[in-house]
Amino acid sequence: MLPDKLFVNVIDTELKTMLEKALPNDEFLQMTIESLVEKGTPPIKSSLQDWRTEGNLLFYKDRVYVPNDPILRRLITKTIHEALPHGHPGQWNTVDQVQRDYWWPGMTKFIKSFVDGCAACQQMKVNTHPTRTPIQPIGGHKDVLPFQIISMDLITDLPRIAECDSILVVVDHAATKGVIFIPCHKKIDATDTAELLFQHVYKRFGLPDKIISDRDPRFAAEVFKEMGKLLGIKQMLSTAYHPQTDGETERVNQEVEIFLRFFCAKEQTKWKELLHFAEFAHNSRTHSVTKNSPFYLAMGYHPRPLPTVFEKTTVPSVEKRVAELKKLREETSALLDIAARRVKERSGKNLDKFEKGQKVWLEGKNLSLGYPSPKLSPKHEGPFEITEVLGPVTYRLKLPFQWRIHPVFHAGLLSPFKETDVHGPNFLEPPPDIVEGQEEYEVEAIIGHRPKKKNQPPKEYLVSWKGYDSSHNQWLKPAGLKHSMELYLEYKIKYNLR
């Protein structure tokens, strides 16, 4: 079982009550109801058939209308954006997820501003600048079925849990862009890989026709050979393998690492428990190329990620769904061809410019901060204040005194910190409690230790403070954790420390 603090904030009857209380004072609602009663013109350009009432709620195209209450709209957006089944999607995917069940005028602008002000997204995600490294995009394939052509890769060196320290990433390369994430060990051989593919891919989609991998081509051949043995076939002549990559699996690797970073950066041993949420989140999101989610391309509908207070009333017939799926997959093939051509046309992006006093994130790749696993550590630290502009691309930052590193950095390692009115403040910075006559801040989590030597107890522990950003993280000796003994003992047990 997951601990209570990891459960999603479900959309429950309390939200329904909030919607019902806010509706009577909403001018847009009053205009809509009047037009429905009088069979007049709705307040926006639409057909009267698009609107209906159910109980005390108003629906527009089978989506709940959210009244003009910024707090309520923020709550709905925050609940969906931050929930485990969604995993902090970007602007457009958050819009897509919210508008599957809710609607209000100007919702796209509102939601984009909310995501733009999310500090967790700024800190945990990688900079998605176009790559300068040439890659070989692979185009679409007509009449291909889900997981008929797959790409495969490993994410390694995660905290070891139940003999697992890696993730086998399997991507449906041509039909849906869906994924399957399989926990494993980084030293798995062809036999182990074949068994995992049978357990997680074959049972759902059958035998793949082709595998794309940037590993040793002999490894892919051995995997197919082992799959043949499991099927009782001596030689599988119809299979093929391609020792190449076009960046698709690498992007998925980044995505799953980002997801796990959001939800277990401060409890890294939870990665295996959260892997199925990461898979669901990816398969629910609309793909930038196909313009549909993997779930929708595979099944013709979106599985429900969270409980809702209302039911969908429109369910297409089987015949209509099959016809729509066929059309979608034909369109997907054409879109993949277009995307493959555009990949080669992408160009670099100019560096950001910053000013003195501005707060920025610092790239964490080359920082040694004591996290158990770099893969699940924040991609950026901060935000830090710029104390001096030293040149066109060089800046001095106000760093924690414990870091003991030169505080001057190139602009390529910095990204702007953003807050928006729609999102609200990210870090509340609560005042300290007074314990035994001394100011005491609440430790949120222990997130690292040093030194990392076997058979030697750590001398210091890296802690994060509740309500404060990572620029306030601090190294404490064990004596400094006397008011956080439960967290201290849990951390030592998790990482088997003396």
Image (cartoon, rainbow, N blue to C red):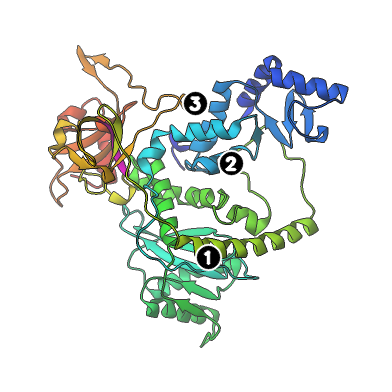
The residue nearer to you, when weighing 38 against 184, is: 38
Do we see residue 43 in this rendering? yes
Amino acid found under the numbered disc labelled 3? Val
Task: State if disc 3 and disc 2 touch (CB < 8 Å).
Answer: no
What stretch of residues is rendered in magenta?
379-385
Residue 207: quarter of image: bottom right
| Dot 2 crowding, Cα within 10 Å, few <14, some 14–19, many 20+ | some
Quadrant that contains the C terminus: top left
**Which label sits in the foreground, 3 or 1?**
3
Residue shown at the point (63%, 38%) measured from the top left: 99
Question: In this image, 251 relative to 439: left or right?
Answer: right
What kind of element bears circle 3? loop
- Residue wearing tag 2: 97
Measured along the vertical axis of the image, is residue 72 above or below residue 81? above
Q: Which residue is most to the right?
A: 38
Residue 469: quarter of image: top left
Of mark 3 and mark 1, the one earlier in the sequence is: 1
Residue shown at the point (60%, 52%) measured from the top left: 291
- Residue wearing tag 3: 422
Question: In this image, 225 relative to 460: left or right?
Answer: right
Of mark 2 and mark 3, the one earlier in the sequence is: 2
Which SS does the magenta portion mostly show? strand
Residue 120: quarter of image: top left
The residue nearer to you, when weighing 172 against 370, is: 172
Quote the CA–CA distance across marks 3 and 1: 37 Å
Mark number displayed over residue 102: none
Quote the CA–CA distance across marks 2 and 3: 18 Å
Task: Give yes or no for residue 294 being in the magenta stretch.
Answer: no
Of mark 1 and mark 2, the one earlier in the sequence is: 2
- Residue wearing tag 1: 173
